[in-house]
Image: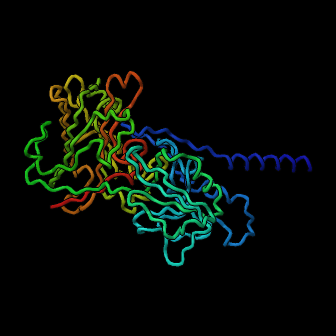
């Protein structure tokens, strides 16, 4: 009888061990032309697992006041921008709140949406460390400007201002691990804030009364629809992958719409053009010179999109067709090449890309149908539109250098598929 009991007990232990060590399958993702992602439905890997690293040794009998609050999905990373960033990385500062009053155990991020200062009625930051970060175009990112220690009395922390182009993080003294990370990087390290649109990258577009001809020529039909000029002085665009001071690619972009199409035109000025592809190998264009485009069927700052902003662990927005990805290029042979990835793989719009070596310009002209998103253009007021300009020339390619022009924080295209970085586009009649 004793032998039978031992055998049964051993079986129970084996089953228990197996159930506690289930496999999680992750598929790597490249934030260039492909839409491969981590497809695990187990969001706890980044959000809930180890949600309070410093809380592990706290007794279940500890008072509620001494318990650390749960972390939220958003975090601030000081690692090089990559698709693999996670909240649980040693290079991530985890947050408990955004733009809310700080309490015991909190790590709160304040932006200019909160106001001009971090203070609120009855706030006292004597038990908090404070870090002020501001955008610096020299580094094409948000960098650390100043730190105030716990218990520091030289400065009244309630008067600390929130930079209009930046943010402030306050961390309670109980958050020793997060506070320790304030000193783990220097003032030249660009910071990435996940799931928050810090810069106002949105714009509005006007409706065209005449359908735009897609022929690779930006002529008078586009003259009223210019959105912006992209160059090294544009504070919303970054040249972080270029050699410092050698920002040879510039661009102008245009956008409009009618009842049937979203129209986009980009004129890239560059002495280089290298794109050894064909229509049959269009998916490889990200390696060379092209534009990559993403369209969202609603505001990227809607509740739904912000809930599913992190494509690395949650591809709901793509899987349900809310975010679509496109690529457009002209091959070295002069052929227009394009692709669509995501819920569809066949591009149903119009595109024409023309390279003019004499003028040193590449002109991209694109029309994407509203029908593809199942949208009635008369009933939608906002949507998302973003793109990158990939600028890898032949010498770069041979040296394994990948160059691109991108909106601040990657624009939701390059570096990390964070949908909160996509501009909100407002439709004007």
**Residue at 24%, 26% in the rendered image:** 331
Q: x, y (%) of residue 338?
A: 26, 35
**Residue at 54%, 78% in the rendered image:** 122
In the foreground, 181 or 280: 181
Vertical order, 39 against 61 (above or below): above
In the foreground, 354 or 262: 354
235 displayed left or right of 87: left
376 displayed left or right of 238: left
Q: Farthest front residue?
A: 154
Q: Farthest right residue?
A: 2
| Quadrant of residue 347 within the rendered picture | top left
| Quadrant of residue 217 within the rendered picture | top left
| Quadrant of residue 111 within the rendered picture | bottom left
**Residue at 15%, 61% in the rendered image:** 429
Q: x, y (%) of residue 48?
A: 58, 56
277 displayed left or right of 195: left
Asked which colour scheme the image uses, the reply is rainbow
Q: x, y (%) of residue 388?
A: 31, 41
- Residue 47 is at least partly visible in this image: yes
- Residue 297 is at least partly visible in this image: no
**Residue at 44%, 48% in the rendered image:** 311
In the foreground, 162 or 24: 162
């Amino acid at each position: 009888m004793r032998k039978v009991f031992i055998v049964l007990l051993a079986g129970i232990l084996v089953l228990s061990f197996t159930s506690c060590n289930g496999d999680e399958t992750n598929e790597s993702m490249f934030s260039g032309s492909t839409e491969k992602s981590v497809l695990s439905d187990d969001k706890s890997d980044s959000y809930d697992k180890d949600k309070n690293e410093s809380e592990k040794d706290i007794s279940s009998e500890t008072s509620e006041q001494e318990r650390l609050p749960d972390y939220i999905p958003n975090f601030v990373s000081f690692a090089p921008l990559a698709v693999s960033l996670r909240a649980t990385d040693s290079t991530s500062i985890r947050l408990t709140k955004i733009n809310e009053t700080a309490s015991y155990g909190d790590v709160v991020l304040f932006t200019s949406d909160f106001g001009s200062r971090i203070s609120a009625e009855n706030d006292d930051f004597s038990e908090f460390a404070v870090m002020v970060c501001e955008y610096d175009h020299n580094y094409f990112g948000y960098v650390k400007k100043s730190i105030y220690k716990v218990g520091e009395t030289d400065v009244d922390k309630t008067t600390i201002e929130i930079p209009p182009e930046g943010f402030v993080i306050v961390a309670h003294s109980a958050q020793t691990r997060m506070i320790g990370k304030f000193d783990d990087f220097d003032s030249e390290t660009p910071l990435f804030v996940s799931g928050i649109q810090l810069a106002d990258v949105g714009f509005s577009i006007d409706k065209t009364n005449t359908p735009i001809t897609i022929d690779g020529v930006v002529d008078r039909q586009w003259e009223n629809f210019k959105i912006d000029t992209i160059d090294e002085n544009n504070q919303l665009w970054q040249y972080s992958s270029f050699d410092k001071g050698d920002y040879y690619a510039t661009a102008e972009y245009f956008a409009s719409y009618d009842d049937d199409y979203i129209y986009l035109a980009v004129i890239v000025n560059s002495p280089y053009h290298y794109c050894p592809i064909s229509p049959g190998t269009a998916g490889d264009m990200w390696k060379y010179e092209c534009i990559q485009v993403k369209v969202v069927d609603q505001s990227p700052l809607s509740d739904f999109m912000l809930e599913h902003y992190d494509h690395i662990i949650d591809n709901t927005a793509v899987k349900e067709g809310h975010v679509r990805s496109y690529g457009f290029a002209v091959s070295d042979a002069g052929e227009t090449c394009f692709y669509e990835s995501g819920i569809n793989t066949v591009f149903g719009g119009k595109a024409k890309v023309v390279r003019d070596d004499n003028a040193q310009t590449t002109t991209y002209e694109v029309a994407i149908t509203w029908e593809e998103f199942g949208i009635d253009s008369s009933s939608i007021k906002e949507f998302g539109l973003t793109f990158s300009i990939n600028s890898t020339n032949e010498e770069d390619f041979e040296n394994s250098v990948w160059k691109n022009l991108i909106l601040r924080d990657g624009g939701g295209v390059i570096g990390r598929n964070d949908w909160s970085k996509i501009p909100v586009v407002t439709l004007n009649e």
